Amino acid sequence: MPKIAKLLTQKEIDALKFGDHAVGGRGLYIKKRETFSCYYVRIRKDGTEYTKYLSGVKSLKRARQIAEEIQEMVKNGIDPREEEKRLAEEKARQKEQAETAERLKRTTFKLVFDQYYREVMVKGLGNPEREYNRVRNHVFPIIGDKPINEITHRDLYTVFDPLYRAKGETARRAQTRVEECFLYAKSLGTFGIIQNPCNEELKLLLAPAKKVKKETQNRPALLYKQIPRFIKLLLETGGTDALMFVFSLLTSARSKAVRLAQWNEIDFENRKWIIPIEHDKQKRIDPRKRTIFLSAQAIQILKSLPKLAEHAYIFPSGIRRNGETTNYSDGQFSILVKRLNDSPELLSGLDLHDPNVLDEFGKPSLITQHGTVRSGFKTWARDDELENFKKYDEQAVEYCMLHFRDAYNGAYDRANMVKHRREIMQDWAEFCISLDDLSDFLNKRK
């Protein structure tokens, strides 16, 4: 039976000589040196003896308590060294978790979106600042300061439900950027996002708001009295896209029809343009309801252009090596307007913004081709200062714009007011630009 050491008092320990001494308790010893003293525990486990130093422990009572705990672990088959290692790892893990939680608490949606803006949006979008401002104005005030890993689909619902009901297109664009931001954040794996809140639950919640019918906003348009100045600016610009815009103004035609117009659609002898059914918004079978009567000015523009082939585009964006022409994209008119707006020296005071149509930031919107062409012609035809409303039959004006809405008239009215429509289109062209002025501009292009 092993000898049990006497339990020494602190006074007796202080009186011990330099060396190693048992101080009583379960394997507790003290190492006394001239410069320091240290308690330690002798441990026997699986026939092996080793020493565990109690670094930093000065109290005898505490040393004996630790020794007791160590020996109990050994008795229960636990290796104190492994237990110490486990506790150290657990402490380190808890510290790391606490630091991560604190870091994520400071990682707000705004902070992550700013990073997404710099690393993704700036590199991939044509107008990233505008997209950023949309999120800043409508999303940041509600969830901008919330930790991104705590945002749920319910939080996003509180953002987008009222926005869809008020500004559907703004909501759609902002939601797209928010969804992309969450995909970006989740892919990095450093923001603690377990489930993307832009999920099916969000789509289900937002479905009713997306279906709310909103009041249709007019497309931004140039005031019709400014159209002659605008046409002069376009002709001085001299590009094919600028001439295409002029032609669309003279014909009051929609963007798609003009951009995809081919030479085989033009009847020069009868001065008319029959738009193919695939290019007509209403998809009417009757070609008479897809016919635009051409003014002398419109014919003059067409005759000034090179005709490469019957099926070549009238206003080509380019020509391939095999001789085939390519058409302009849907955004070309907007690109042209923006380019002109960015060149104040060309505008000579002409403002290309519609003061009556404000954008989501409360500023006048840049004009559009559709708004200027369609609204300009209709407003001119109904103007009371010029007393045009007395000159032109309202239904004939609608027919000029290819608005055939009355199903019964479509069935029984076979004339479609052709003579009067020709007069209206010619008067409109005379208002826009004279033949002599147009000839001068076209001659300069040659």
Image (cartoon, helix red, strand yellow):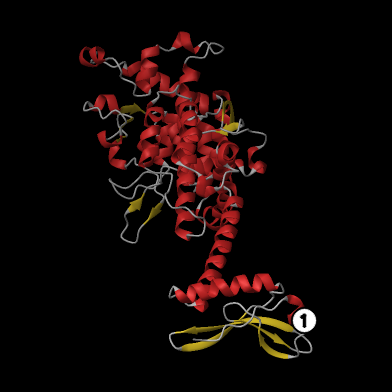
* 32 left or right, relative to 342: right
Q: Closer to the camera, 366 or 132?
A: 132
Amino acid type at mark 1: Asp
At x 58% / y 38%, what residue is drawn?
233
At x 21% / y 28%, what residue is drawn?
285
* 102 left or right, relative to 446: right
Q: Closer to the camera, 259 or 364?
A: 364
Q: For numbered disc 1, what is the local secondary structure?
A: helix
Q: Is residue 260 visible?
A: yes
Compared to 307, does 9 lie above or below?
below
At x 49% / y 86%, what residue is drawn?
1
Q: Closer to the camera, 73 or 353?
A: 73
To which residue does mark 1 refer?
Answer: 14
Q: Is residue 246 visible?
A: no
Residue sticking out furthest to the top: 390
Q: How many marks?
A: 1
Residue 359, quarter of picture: top right
At x 52% / y 78%, what residue is drawn?
81
Residue 12, quarter of picture: bottom right
Q: Position of residue 283 (x, y in %)?
A: 26, 30
Residue 31, quarter of picture: bottom right
Q: Position of residue 320 (x, y in %)?
A: 35, 58
Q: Position of residue 150 (x, y in %)?
A: 51, 46
Q: Position of residue 338 (x, y in %)?
A: 56, 42
Compared to 439, does 122 lie above or below?
below
The residue carrying pointer 1 sits among few (fewer than 14), some (14 to 19) or many (20 or more) residues within 10 Å by Cα, namely: few
